[in-house]
Amino acid sequence: MDFIRYRVADADETFLDEFATNAPDVAEERIDRIRRFHPDLTVTETPDND
């Protein structure tokens, strides 16, 4: 099963969250919750096949 690792940081590159999932809709919901408090996010997606 292929997972994607998401790393979320704010505009100042302060780390906010990191998680892995194989469900893009779950990732989008989680990122949207963070975006309510930190509107300028940087989200990095990388394969997580470990």
Image (cartoon, rainbow, N blue to C red):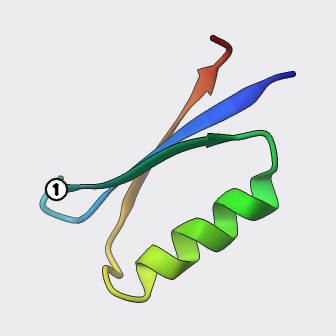
Residue 35 falls left or right of residue 10 = right
Side (left or right) of 17 relative to 6: left
SS of the residue under disc 1? loop
49 sits left or right of 32 in the view: right
State which quarter of the image contains the C terminus. Answer: top right
Among the 4 quarters of the image, the one containing residue 3: top right
Q: In the figure, 41 relative to 48: above or below?
A: below
Residue 16: % across, % down: 30, 59
Q: Give how far across and how far down residue 26 sits, in percent.
A: 74, 61
Q: Is residue 46 above or below residue 33?
A: above
Q: Residue furthest right?
A: 1
**Residue 45 screen position, x and y as percent:** 54, 38
Q: x, y percentage for residue 20?
A: 61, 39
Q: Is residue 48 above or below residue 11?
A: above
Figure quadrant of residue 38: bottom left
**If the image is split into quadrants, where does the N terminus sit?**
top right
- Residue for badge 1: 14
In the picture as drawn, the residue positioned furthest to the left comes out as 12
Q: Residue at x 67, y 65 (%)?
A: 28
* Number of numbered labels in the structure image: 1
Q: Which residue reaches farthest bottom?
A: 36
Identify residue type, mark 1. Thr
Name above or below for residue 42 compared with residue 47: below
Residue occupying image coordinates x 59% and y 68%: 30
Crowding at dot 1, Cα within 10 Å, few <14 / some 14-19 / many 20+, comes out as few
- Residue 18 located left or right of residue 13: right
